[in-house]
Image: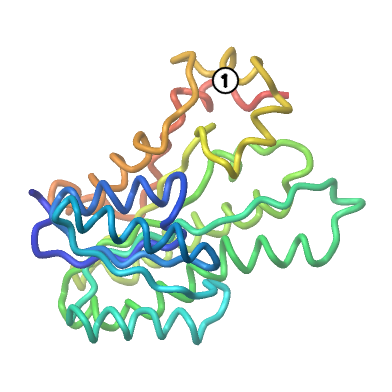
C-alpha cells in the first residue's frame, strides 16, 4: 500500500467524488479524516464501513467557509495522528444563474465554499507540512475554469482562482518538500452535476471523445496518484480528467 503510514484530510468526503477519494486513499493505507457539513448519518456510516474494511478514519463536522472551523479540523487531526501528510480540498457547490439575475448570495456561497475553503485549509496545514518537510496538497478544480457555460460565472471564477492559487502555493512550498497540484474533472456522474447533465442530455456524451461520463473513481485514482511518492516531481500542475472533453471545447 503506497500510502501506508500517511495521514490525509479530505473535505466534502461523504458523497460523490469526495467519498471515492476517501476510499481510494484509505485503501492505499492512509488514515483519513474527512470533513462534512450536515450529513451526520452518511458520515458515521462511512466511518463504520471503512472500519469493516480495516481502514482507520475520522469524520469531522465543519463549515469549510469558516477559517476558525478549518483550523480546528487540522488541530483535531494533529492531536489524534500527530501529522498531516495529504490535504485534498474537494468541497464544492454549484449555484448556477445568469449574471444579470445572479444574487449576491449565490455568488458568495460558491466563492466561500469552492475558493475560500482552499485558502482556509491550505494555510492551516502549511506550517505542519513545512516543519515535516513533506506534504501533498491536491485542490479540486474543474474544466469550467477554462471552458465555461453561460450561467456559471461564479463557479468558473472560483475554479479559476483555485488553479492560480495552486500555482502560487506550489512555488512557495516546493523547497520544503510540499507539492501542490490540482485535478480538473470533466462531466462526472455525481449528485452535484445532475442538473447540468440532465439539461444537456445526450449532447454531453457526443462531446466526450471516450463517449462516456466520468465516474467518481476516475477522479479518485488521479488524486491517489498525486498523493503518492510517484508524483514527487510534479507540482504546480492541473491534471485534467475529462475523457478528452476539452479537446473540442464544452457543450454549447
Q: Is 249 above or below relative to 155?
A: above
Q: Is 198 above or below relative to 191?
A: above
Q: Is residue 27 left or right of residue 101?
A: left
Q: Position of residue 34 (x, y in %)?
A: 36, 64
Q: Nearer the viewer, residue 40 or 250?
A: 40
- What residue is shown at x 57% (from left), y 74% (from top)? 65
Considering the image in quadrants, where does the C terminus appear?
top right
Color encoding of the figure = rainbow
Q: Which residue is mark 1?
A: 248
Secondary element at tag 1: loop
The mark total stands at 1
Q: Position of residue 200 (x, y in %)?
A: 70, 24
- What residue is shown at x 17% (from left), y 57% (from top)? 55
- What residue is shown at x 39% (from left), y 67% (from top)? 169
How packed mark 1 is, by other alpha carbons closer than 10 Å (few <14, some 14-19, many 20 or more), is few
Q: Is residue 56 left or right of residue 1?
A: right
- What residue is shown at x 49% (from left), y 54% (from top)? 163
Answer with the quarter of the image where residue 109 lies.
bottom right
Answer with the quarter of the image where residue 193 lies.
top right
Q: Position of residue 118 (x, y in %)?
A: 48, 67
Q: Position of residue 98 (x, y in %)?
A: 85, 46
Q: Nearer the viewer, residue 42 or 158?
A: 42
Q: Is residue 51 left or right of residue 207?
A: left
Q: Nearer the viewer, residue 152 or 179?
A: 152
Amino acid at each position: 500500500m503506497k500510502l501506508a503510514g500517511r495521514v490525509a484530510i479530505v473535505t466534502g468526503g461523504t458523497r460523490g467524488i469526495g467519498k471515492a477519494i476517501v476510499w481510494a486513499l484509505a485503501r492505499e493505507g492512509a488514515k483519513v479524516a474527512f470533513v462534512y457539513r450536515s450529513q451526520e448519518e452518511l458520515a458515521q456510516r462511512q466511518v463504520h464501513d471503512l472500519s469493516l474494511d480495516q481502514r482507520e478514519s475520522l469524520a469531522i463536522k465543519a463549515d469549510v467557509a469558516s477559517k476558525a472551523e478549518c483550523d480546528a479540523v487540522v488541530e483535531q487531526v494533529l492531536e489524534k495522528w500527530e501529522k498531516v501528510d495529504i490535504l485534498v480540498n474537494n468541497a464544492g457547490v454549484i449555484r448556477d444563474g445568469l449574471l444579470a439575475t445572479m444574487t449576491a448570495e449565490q455568488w458568495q456561497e460558491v466563492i466561500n465554499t469552492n475558493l475560500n475553503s482552499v485558502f482556509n485549509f491550505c494555510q492551516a496545514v502549511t506550517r505542519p507540512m513545512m516543519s515535516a518537510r513533506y506534504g501533498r496538497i491536491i485542490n479540486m478544480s474543474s474544466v469550467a475554469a477554462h471552458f465555461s457555460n453561460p450561467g456559471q460565472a461564479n463557479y468558473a471564477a472560483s475554479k479559476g482562482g483555485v488553479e492560480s492559487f495552486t500555482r502560487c502555493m506550489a512555488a512557495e512550498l516546493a523547497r520544503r518538500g510540499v507539492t501542490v497540484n490540482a485535478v480538473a474533472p470533466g462531466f462526472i456522474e455525481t449528485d452535484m452535476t445532475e442538473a447540468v447533465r440532465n439539461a444537456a442530455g445526450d449532447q454531453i456524451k457526443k462531446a466526450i471523445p471516450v463517449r462516456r461520463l466520468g465516474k467518481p473513481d476516475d477522479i479518485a485514482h488521479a488524486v491517489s496518484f498525486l498523493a503518492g511518492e510517484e508524483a514527487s516531481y510534479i507540482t504546480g500542475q492541473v491534471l485534467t480528467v475529462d475523457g478528452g472533453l476539452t479537446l473540442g471545447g464544452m457543450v454549447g
